Each structure stands twice: as C-alpha cells, then as structure tokens.
Image (cartoon, rainbow, N blue to C red):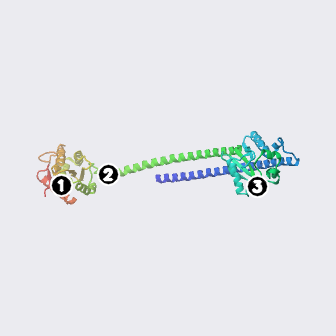
Amino acid sequence: MFIKHGKIIIIFNFILLVIFGLKMYQDYHDNEELKKIGVLSESSALAHLTKSFRKAYQDVIVNNHIKLDEKTINLLPVKTSRAVSEKFSSLVDSQVHIRTVSDTPRNIINQASDEEIRLIQYFRDNPSEISVLRLSDNGGYIYGEPLYVKPLCLKCHGKREDAPKLIRDNYDGAYEYKVGDIRGLLSINYMKHDFVDRLDYNYRKNSIVILLIFASMFIGIIILVRNINAKDALFRASSEKQKDELRRLSITDHLTGMHNRYYYDEVINKEMRRAKRNKKYLVYAMFDLDHFKHYNDIYGHQKGDLLLQKVSSVFHENLSRTSDFCFRLGGEEFLALYTVENEMQVITVAEKIREGIFALNVEHVKSEPFNKVTSSGGIAIYSPDSEVNEDTLYARADNALYKAKSSGRNQIVVFEE
C-alpha cells in the first residue's frame, strides 16, 4: 500500500513539474512577445521621426535652392542622420543606434554591417515587406526599414554627369539608380534597452519564485516519499520477520526446538536426492529413549519434558553442520539425518549422540541395569547407488532400532540386508 501511494505521489510530482515547466515556458513566450511589441512600437515611432527629419532636410535644401558646397554638403540627410543618432544615444540610458546604411555606400562610414546587409537583401527578396524586427548578433534587437529611391534622389544618384559637381568630384560610386530601387536601410539597433531589461528582470524574478515554490514542494514530496518508503520498508521487514517466525514455528517442535515431523516430510526426499547427486552416504539414524513411559510414570510429565529438552541439546551439539538435521518424530522418538563420505563413518555421529545422552546421568530407576536414562538407535544407510525410497529407509531404521532394544538397549544397530 505504501509503495502504491509513493508511486502516486511521484506521478503527481511529475505532473506538477510539467505544469510548472509549461507555466515558465508560457511566461517566457509572453515576455519575448512583450519585448518585441515594445521594441517594435518604439522602433516604428523612431523610424517615422527619422524619415520625417530626413524629408525635412531634403525639403530645406530643395525648396531653398541651396547649392551644395563644402559646408552645405553636411546638411544632406545621410550625414545629419548619423549626427542626430549619436546625439540621441548619448542623451538616453538605452543604447539605441539609428543609422542609414547601404551595401554600396558612397561614404565608407555608412557601410552596412553583415546583418544589415542581410536585412537589405531580405527586403529585395520580399518587396511587399515594409519593416522587420529581429534578434541582433549582439544579443539585442535590430529593426530595419528599406529606403527606396525617389525622384528627388536622382539629383545625386541618377546619371553621374547630371549630379552636382561637388558630388562628382568627391564620389565615384552610387550612381545609375532608378526610382523604386532600394538605395539603403534605415537601421535601428538596440544594444541595451531599459524596457527590455525590466521585462527580463521581472521574468527572472518570477521564474526564481516559481522555481523556489516547485523546489520546496518537490523536496517536501521527496521527504514524504522517503518517509513512506521507510515505513513501508519497516512494515515489509516486520512482515518478513513475522513470516520467518511463523515459518520457524511451523517446522519446529515447540518443546525441544528440534525440527518436527512436518519439516521431516518436506526435506527427506530432497536430502536423499542431494546425497545421491554428491555421491555421499545418507545416514538415517532413529533413536528412542529407553523405558521413557516408566520415566514419566515415576518422575512425572514435567520431568519428562525437561528430559526431552536435555536430550535435544545432545542432538544439536553433535549435528552442527548445515547439512545435518535432527527431528523429534513424536513422543520420545528422534531422528538424526546426516551425510558421510564412506560406510566406516556411518555410526560415528550416532554413537556420540548415544554416549551424550548416557553422559547426562539422569536417574531412571526402571532402566536396568544402568539406573539412568539411556537410548537405543537403529541406522539405515542410503548409499549413492541405492534405489530405496523414504518409507523403506524408515522401515529399515525402525527394524534396526527394534533389534537394539531387544538386544539389551543403550546401543546402536545398523540395518543389514
């Protein structure tokens, strides 16, 4: 359940991230649009002002029939526009440069830059366009409007022989234009703009606030998920521990701590197969406490239970390998199951168990001639080439046990075919 809830929270967190991401993207898009609208609006106004200024200067020269000479040539719009632009940029905080440029200027100072040349070519390729605003190479904006040749322009830019003498003497190019040709470009370059900077500042501020909100929520959710996972891990560990405990109880004799008959039924055939696979001898040693019924009758069942617990400790001490097993099959009947390399080792462990029980020195007046608790054992051997089953092993061990008891008890007998 905890894991399921954790996954739901993570999915929710992902959806939240997508929503915040879309919100930031929309804010960025809106911010860029506002910047373009503001810059475009200002650029259009400046362009109209500049063209009006150029037209006014042209009218002054033409209407007053001013003759061009070394002084009056500086009144030409291409010169005055540059001077006014420089003055304008020095009076405002924003770094705005207004230029009239050409890709084939008479004066090299009016040479169009690479991006201005691209704008001129754009207008030549798209004659219906009247203006364009783009991101500039310097990271700001550049606005451009095409400057077309009008009849008045032909006075200086028509045929060379028709141009004023001062123009012919000082300039070799920029002739042979026709009305309607693109003569140049009115360029407005925003390297820095207060309006743009304020919008960017507000966008960054809002983005930081959004990121902080998301980060706080994300960290909070992560902490929540971690806590849920920790509780889930604790719950699962507790469940596993409980399952392990239930498993242990289900296969353990509650009085002696030895494996019970249920676990014997589960492992006996597995151990037989493993012994055959490993080419080892499986020793099936059945034990029975001698005269145990008399012991209970004389000393009581409480003493009898205590005796069974002491006997079980002897089995545990002598069957300590992970491949060794000891079972309480019922009452005072026990089974030791272990493997050996050869037949010579078969009886060794069983004898140690019998001797260990004898060494307990527990008084038993009805166990003659020893007068203390003893045990008898019957062994059946499952060899690597044996084909007998578990029932046959049990019958053989039980038969050997009967012989041990009938032969005087306190001894081990190995079944012989």
Q: Nearer the viewer, residue 82 or 3?
A: 82
Badge 2: few (under 14), some or many (20 or more) residues near its Cα, within 10 Å?
A: some
Can residue 322 be seen from the camera position used here? yes
Q: What residue type is labelled 1?
A: Ile
Image point (46%, 52%), residue name: 3
Can residue 35 be seen from the camera position used here? no
Separation of disc 3 and disc 2 at Cα?
102 Å
Quickly name the residue at label 1: 381
Q: What residue type is labelled 2?
A: Leu
Mark seen at residue 181: 3
Q: Which of 171 and 46 is in front in this view?
A: 171
Q: Which of 112 and 278 is in front in this view?
A: 112
Q: Where is residue 204 in the image (x, y as percent from the top left)?
A: 63, 45
Indicate which disc, 1 or 2, sits on the residue closer to the N terminus: 2
Quickly name the residue at label 2: 249
Q: Where is residue 21 in the image (x, y as percent from the top left)?
A: 59, 51
Separation of disc 1 and disc 2 at Cα?
30 Å
Mark seen at residue 168: none
Q: Where is residue 335 in the image (x, y as percent from the top left)?
A: 22, 52
Kindly state the secondary structure of the residue where label 3 is placed: loop
Kindly state the secondary structure of the residue where label 1 is placed: strand
Q: What residue type is labelled 3?
A: Asp
Indicate which disc, 3 or 2, sits on the residue closer to the N terminus: 3
